Amino acid sequence: MGASSSRAAGRGTFRRSLPAGTSCKALRSSKASSISRMAGVLPACHALGIGFVPYSPLGRGFLTGQLTSGAALAPDDYRHSLPRFQPQAMAANANMVAELQRLAAARGATAAQLALAWLLAQGTNIVPIPGARSVANLEENVAAAQIELSDAELAAIGAAFAAASVHGARYPQHELAMLGL
């Protein structure tokens, strides 16, 4: 069976086996390279008409630009245990957030809004579920849907967050092991 016929067979199989409204879910991985491994998932979801729900699309608050160090977190905050919130990783990832903030300021938006607008621009089948600890956060997140990014802005944001530039695993190794990753 050729690549195109297996792709067509797979598409039909998926369409028959998935109920309407089924969503693809991103796999959690210990390495930033998981982003590049997921590169085929988004086009597949789009081609098959399957929704994709990015989990924690603001990086547990990091992409808002409001967290510059772990010291800003409460002593019992779960994020202290996450590799991306360790001092070295936060410092290494700070340039990405600074670039997001720079691009957002040029648009009169917040870093969180720009990050969400970028996600929404990736396809109508992508539905991020950002958290909101206050009504103000909720309103800020909802306003992101009104931001239309240019091709140049989309490319700049995408380049700033290239998979190879993310430092720190998403979860501690023992949690990844529980997930079989």
Image: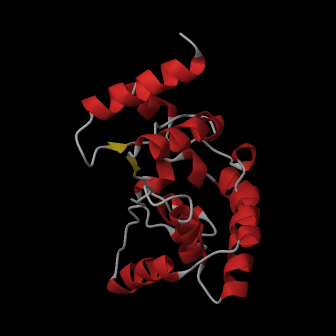
Residue at the left extreme, as displayed: 19
Residue at 51%, 47% (x, y): give it: 82
Snapshot quadrant of residue 70 = bottom right
Q: Position of residue 168 (x, y in %)?
A: 63, 44
The picture quadrant where one finds residue 22 is top left
Residue 54 vs residue 50, the one in the foreground: 50
Kindly identify the residue that appears in the image at 57 percent across and 45 percent down.
83
Counting from the top left corner in percent of width and height, residue 100 is at: 69, 71
Q: How many labels does the image show?
A: 0
Q: Is residue 32 left or right of residue 126?
A: right
Query: Residue 169: x, y in percent?
Result: 58, 41
125 vs 154, left or right, is: left
For the question of whether residue 119 can be seen, the reply is yes
Q: In this view, does 20 lie above or below 76?
A: above
In this rendering, position of residue 158 left or right of residue 4: right
Q: Which residue lies furthest to the bottom in this view?
A: 108
Location of residue 13 by image quarter: top left
Residue sitting at x 57%, y 54%: 85
Residue 90 position in % (x across, y down): 66, 57
Tell me the colour scheme of the image. Answer: secondary structure
Q: Is residue 173 above or below residue 118?
A: above
Q: From the viewer's perspective, is 96 left or right of 137? A: right
Whether residue 181 is visible: no
Q: Which of 38 and 49 is in front in this view?
A: 49
- Between 113 and 81, the residue placed more toward the observer is 113
Vertical comparison of 148 with 136: above or below: above
